[in-house]
C-alpha cells in the first residue's frame, strides 16, 4: 500500500520474514581454518534476498580419498557447477561435490614401513598410470625384493579398481661357525652371521 487516507486511528503492524539461511554441506568432507580442523560437515550463514553469492568462496578441507570438484544444489551430482554464482531467493543447501579416488594399498607382507606400520594406503584418479613404490619396507632376516600384484612383479600399473601391492622378500642366508669343541669367541661354541 503506497498511501491511504486515514479517517480514524489505525495501527500498522510490521511483518517480518527471516533472512534466508545458506547451508554449505561438505558432503563427506569437513571444515577448517587457520590450521584447525572441525568435525562438523555443514556451515551456515544468513543472507539477504537478492544477495549474489560467489559459490567458489567456500572450500571444505581436502579428503584423503576424494578430490573436491566444486559445488552444486544436487547432493548427488558428479560434476560441479562451473564459475557459479547464486542469487539468494530463500534458504538453500549447497553441496560439495567430490570425485572419489581409488585406493592402492601397500602391504609390507611381514615387514614394516619407516613409521612402524605394516600397510599404507595411497589414493589415485581412476585410469591414472602409477609407478609402484611406497618407500622400502624392512623385515628382519629378509632382503626386500620388490613389489608384486597378484604374485607378479610390477613397476607400474594403471589404476582402474582398488589394488593391493605386496612386498616380496628373499630370506637372508646365515652362516653358523661351530668351534667343534673349542670356542668361537667370548666362551661361545657357535656364532651365526
Image (cartoon, rainbow, N blue to C red):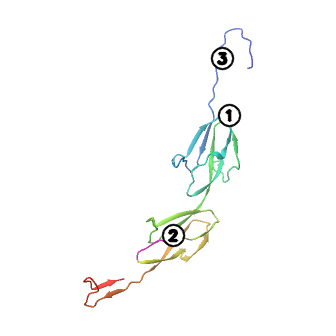
Point out which mark residue 126 bears.
Answer: none
38 to 156, vertically: above or below: above
Q: Residues within 10 Å of mark 2 (few under 14, many from 20)?
A: few
Q: Is residue 130 left or right of residue 172?
A: right
Q: x, y (%) of residue 6?
A: 72, 11
25 to 49, vertically: above or below: below
Residue at image mark 2: 135
Provide the secondary structure element on which disc 3 rests: loop
Comparing labels 1 and 3, the label whose residue is closer to the camera: 1
Q: Is residue 105 left or right of residue 139?
A: right
- The residue drawn where x is 57% and y is 42% is 43
Q: Residues within 10 Å of mark 3 (few under 14, many from 20)?
A: few
Judge by depth and name the residue closer to the eye, 150 or 99: 99
Comparing labels 2 and 1, the label whose residue is closer to the camera: 2
Q: Give the distance between the C-alpha atoms of the residues marked 2 and 3, in whole angstroms.
A: 76 Å
Q: How many marks?
A: 3
Provide the secondary structure element on which disc 2 rests: loop
Q: Reading the chain from its start, which is encountered first: label 2 or label 1?
A: 1
Region rendered in magenta = 136-140
Comparing labels 2 and 3, the label whose residue is closer to the camera: 2
Q: x, y (%) of residue 193?
A: 36, 82
In contact (CB < 8 Å): disc 2 and disc 3: no
100 to 149, vertically: above or below: above
In contact (CB < 8 Å): disc 2 and disc 1: no
Amino acid at each position: 500500500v503506497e498511501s491511504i487516507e486515514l479517517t480514524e486511528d489505525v495501527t500498522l503492524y510490521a511483518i517480518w520474514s527471516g533472512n534466508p539461511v545458506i547451508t554449505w554441506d561438505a558432503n563427506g568432507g569437513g571444515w577448517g581454518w587457520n590450521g584447525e580442523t572441525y568435525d562438523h560437515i555443514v556451515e551456515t550463514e544468513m543472507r539477504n534476498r537478492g544477495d549474489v553469492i560467489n559459490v567458489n568462496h567456500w572450500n571444505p578441507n581436502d579428503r584423503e580419498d576424494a578430490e573436491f570438484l566444486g559445488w552444486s544444489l544436487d547432493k548427488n551430482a558428479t560434476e560441479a557447477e562451473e564459475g557459479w554464482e547464486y542469487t539468494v531467493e530463500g534458504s538453500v543447501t549447497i553441496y560439495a561435490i567430490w570425485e572419489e579416488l581409488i585406493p592402492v594399498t601397500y602391504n609390507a607382507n611381514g615387514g614394516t614401513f619407516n613409521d612402524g606400520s605394516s600397510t599404507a594406503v595411497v589414493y589415485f584418479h581412476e585410469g591414472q598410470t602409477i609407478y609402484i613404490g611406497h618407500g622400502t619396507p624392512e623385515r628382519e632376516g629378509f632382503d626386500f625384493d620388490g613389489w608384486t600384484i597378484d604374485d607378479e612383479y610390477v613397476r607400474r600399473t594403471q589404476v582402474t579398481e582398488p589394488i593391493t601391492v605386496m612386498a616380496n622378500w628373499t630370506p637372508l642366508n646365515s652362516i653358523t661357525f661351530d668351534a667343534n669343541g673349542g670356542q668361537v669367541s667370548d666362551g661361545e661354541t657357535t656364532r651365526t652371521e
